[in-house]
Image: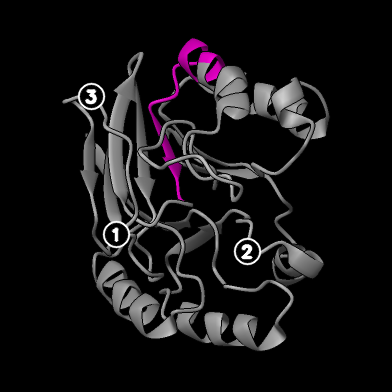
Amino acid sequence: AEMITTFVAYGDSQSCESNHMQLLRQAAYLGPAAIIHCGDIVERGERKDQWIDAFKTLGLVPPWTDFLPCPGNHDLPDNGYQRHFPTIGLWYSRDFGSCRVISLNAFDPDLPLRRGQQWRWLLRALQSHTGPKIVFFHLPLFSPGIPDIWMHGSNLPLRAVLHPLFVQERVNLVLCGHEHLYYRTVQDDVWYIISGGGGGNIWGRRPLNTTDVMDVTILVRGFTIITVQQK
């Protein structure tokens, strides 16, 4: 028998709790196996009040749905992310039937250098699994954003290391945030989606790179629905 597993993904709610709440209610209604947050849960990771408000909103996640976060640049100051998610660590994986979902810390300085604890763990997590693989982290490898000092645009050091690995290990889908928009591209049979419309301001007036006709860029608030068919 075929089983269908549904995931919902978005990022960059950034303490805009009324927008976040609206999205989360709609997402929970779908009854997903997991809600994937691609980072920047709060605007300022050092502010305890913003985390308190965020967790009130996250109380809308149903008990049968896993909430899977990854660290964004706004979450990390004063170890805000680590203090509020102490049990999962900065990188981890979860299996849903035959589908493996892998969360990474894009801000690990050793990752672009192919070294360190997270890199070695990632190799094992990918190589030990033969079923569908979804990887998510905050900074996009492919992006329509214009590069700036806040790490917008395509992250070329991470792309040089991670994209060949994802191709080699047949990763099906990579989810990111950071850019406040929806973007989709397929590179060497790997699907890349930016789902950064999780509540923060949409970049309607921000200049964008011109991209290939197969790439899709939409300035919209919302989440991405992923369905995985498993035998």
Residue 32 lies, in percent from the top left, at 33, 59
Decide which of tag 2 and tag 1 comes sooner along the chain.
2
Where disc 3 sits, the SS reads loop
What amino acid type is highlighted by mark number 2?
A: His
Front tag of 2 and 3: 3
What amino acid type is highlighted by mark number 1?
A: Arg
| Left or right placement of residue 200 versus residue 213 in this view | right
Q: Are marks 2 and 1 in contact (CB under 8 Å)?
A: no
* Badge number at residue 19: none
What amino acid type is highlighted by mark number 3?
A: Asp
Outermost residue, left side: 213
Q: Which residue is mark 3?
A: 212
Residue 61 lies in the magenta-colored region: no
- Residue sitting at 34 percent across and 60 percent down? 203
Please tell me which residue lies in front, 212 or 67.
212
| Left or right placement of residue 9 versus residue 15 in this view | left
Where disc 1 sits, the SS reads loop
Decide which of tag 1 and tag 3 comes sooner along the chain.
1
Separation of residues labelled 2 and 1 (CA atoms)? 22 Å
Depicted 35 relative to depicted 22: above or below = above
Q: Which residue is mark 1?
A: 205
Q: Which residue is mark 2?
A: 74
Separation of residues labelled 2 and 3 (CA atoms)? 30 Å
Decide which of tag 2 and tag 3 comes sooner along the chain.
2
Residue 229 makes an appearance in the image: no
Outermost residue, top side: 168
Question: Bounds of the magenta span?
Answer: 164-177
